[in-house]
Image (cartoon, rainbow, N blue to C red):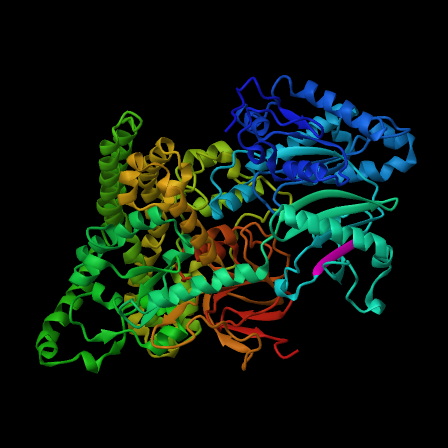
Amino acid sequence: MNGPMDDRLPWLCCFDDDIPDAVTDPVRWLGGKGMSLRRMREMGLTVPPWFTISTDCCRQYLEGGRAFPLDLSDQVAAAVRRLETASGRTFGDAGSPLLLAVRSGAPVSLPGLLPTILSCGVTRSMAADVPELADPFEQFVHTIGTARGEAAGSSDLPDDPHELLMQAIAAVMDRWESPALQQYLNRHDITDCQGTAVTVQVMVAADVSGVLFTRDPRDASAGHMLLELVDGAGDAMLAGEQEPTRLRLERESGRVLDDHETVSATAERLSTEQLRELARDAGRLEEAYSGPVDIEFGIAGGQFSYFQVRSAKPVASADAELIEFRDRVERQLTTLPGRLWVRHNLDEQLPCPTLLTWEILREMMRGEGGFIRAYQRLGFRPTARVVQDGFLELIGSRIYASADRLPELFGPKLPWRHDPEQVHRDPSCIDRFPTRFDLDAVDSATVLRLPGNLYRLVRAQGRMLQMSKTIADECSSKTVPALCDYVKAERSRSLAAMTDEELSHCLWERSHRVLGEFAAALTLPGLLGGWAFTRLQDELTARIGSPEGPALARELARPDSIPVEAEHDASLMMRTAGTITVETFLQRYGHRGPDELELSQPRWSEAPDMLPEPRGDAAPSPTSPVASRGETETRLQAALAANGARSLAGRIDGFARIARQLLPYREIGRHWLMLGYSLIRDCTEEYARRSNLGQSIYHLTRSELRQLPHAGPKWSDLVAKRQQERELARQLNLPMVIDTSQSGRFARPPAVPEEVTFEATAISGGSSRGPAQLIEDPNTPVEPGCVAVIDALSPLVALQLGSAAAVVARRGGVLSHGALLIRQLGIPAVVCPQLPAVRDGQLLSVDAEVGTVSLEDAYE
């Protein structure tokens, strides 16, 4: 790629310039938009004059601390003069103003993630002197403010048109480092783009604007084209802010196929000859791009102007790929042992892991990994099968647990199993000891072993009770200092100076120490806290009943205070609210990150720009409406007395105290584990630095990683295939529970249910009602007063829910990290795996006291 230090290359390229011979990849240099404009102009189509600032310049700008190269301003000024000559207008002249659009244009498609700034060239004084320029100036102020993520005021802007243009260019480049865009790049495994090109183009005062799809994306087999039209400029339509008129056109002639009575006045402004011309140009572009294309255009004074063309994959093609991928997953299920597979809570934090991340992290859950070691230390005897193979599998790139293997964590030949009906009804039951006595598993040997097995289980319970008294001190005074010393020693070693063999051994040794020895010690307190909470909840539910028993358990287990190590997610929310500085946050949590279990993702210290900026509408600091400890104790005593269980008060208080003390260690342990985990990422990043594959190394296995220095380019096709499969996996709607004994395993829930009230697990108390808002992206703004419907209790999503009236998650545990954060927000929340498909705006009622979700207008 052409680096910014290459003196042979200018920072920009005008519409009538030849691309320098030194440019080996024009699309990477000028971006997709810049190259599409050149291609259309070469075909003889009318394209408004433009110049494109290269991706090299963007990279130089960002790497230089957001400072432009010294000669860019002069090159831009010279390019603007050429636009003036081509258009016959003058930049900054109120009498005949040249208005420019400043548009992004990365080498790959980034839908809606990079901004467009319109009507650049009108200054504050020009708008004051010429009333006709007030609207364009207001448009510029609005679009540059949107690009910057702030409400820009005209008084904040310079009154010099050239300075306005340079600020607009900077605003587009700045967005390359926005958290939303970086998360999109990571999510879609786009690892080889280092910046965006910026195209500055003469604006056209279009009478009509539109987008033509040469194949209807809704039905590519139908044979017609789809045209979307609006009056005036089309930017509002592209941004989804204006509803267009949609027309079906015959491919060859451009003839409108719709009933003319339904065609609006907008469509009637295109003559038959214009439609024929549009169809003819579309056919030429489709031939040039060897397939379907989307074309953006405008019509001014009866003449077409083309703004962009890009290849388009028909929906039918994408559906075919998804169906083929789903069939492969179905075939995978036929090879897996066991009947029931349940989406594991690890999937909440690590959806669709890269292959390298999965191979490394999976070792913690089997063999000598920390999870298995922790169970062994508690006094259980996991079976050889669980030790060797673990209980987790990657099914369609999602993490599932075997409901058949999980009981083997407690010991061999135990006659208890998870009840399939209960698993379907409440998938979270797999996190508890199985309750179904399996008569089919009972033989004479089982009967003989039963007393010994029962003795070991009882002894393990006593051991857990004893360990709970000292484990917190052991973790704080021994494990954490030992880990910090280990990290400090490892940081002093130079990975760059290691041979490939030494680096491979370093990766293995760090993985073994961090995810084995340290993970076991850091996991134990949280496991004991979860055990105590489960015992507390079971005792109260058995004696008092539901929903009062579980509600009291949640309140009794709430910690009196939370250590700073456990407040990562709450501190993120405080950062959003502007009550904590970047420096303070990084000092505490720099080794953590937004998707910290995924090794391919950066830590906060590596990419501080990914931290959320303070917002004016940020959620307030977490508050909780939960009653005081004294009030809760009073309610407990009254409930126990009313149910004849006052004698159990001491036992219940003991479990509550353990839960209060140790539940925060689920987060504390994670906090320190991520410190060690960052050492593992250091190794994988060194591999990425050494390889010409860069970040794509995360799609290789560990054995492939060791071969990498000697493998050459042969891995590129393999990596591309795995990246595609990972993207397809994100689109596949895999259920919470997969039953390999049933057909149609991936069938979606019905859109209209037979019943309108569903049982749910309460996460945070209270009740509320409101319109549903489906939240799929962590960056989606949450409408105040909505009932947020989310797939999983992810902390990244939970951070955005402060203004919601209630939350319904399809999966997630009461003790998950997202659940802890939502309880801090004090929002009614439930987990409802049985929730059917709902639509945005559908009225939902959430009762987190009883544990129900009602669809109020399910039959409308």
| Residue 738 position within the rendered picture, expressed as x and y whole percent measured from the top left | 38, 70
| Residue 513 position within the rendered picture, expressed as x and y whole percent measured from the top left | 23, 42
**Residue 72 counted in the magenta span:** no
Report the number of numbered marks. Answer: 0
The residue at the point 37 percent across, 56 percent down is 346
Could you say which quadrant of the image residue 785 lies in? bottom right
Residue nearest the observer in this picture, 715 or 40? 40
Q: Is residue 740 above or below residue 479?
A: below
Quarter containing the C terminus: bottom right
User: Which residue range is magenta in the image?
Assistant: 225-229
Could you say which quadrant of the image residue 336 lies in? bottom left
Q: Is residue 796 above or below residue 94?
A: below
User: Can residue 238 be seen in this snapshot?
Assistant: no
Could you say which quadrant of the image residue 197 lies in? top right
The residue at the point 57 percent across, 18 percent down is 8
| Residue 491 position within the rendered picture, expressed as x and y whole percent measured from the top left | 30, 29
User: Can residue 23 be seen in this snapshot?
Assistant: yes
Residue nearest the observer in this picture, 582 or 300? 300
Task: Give the prevailing secondary structure in the magenta stretch.
Answer: strand
Residue nearest the observer in this picture, 614 or 627? 614
The residue at the point 48 percent across, 61 percent down is 322
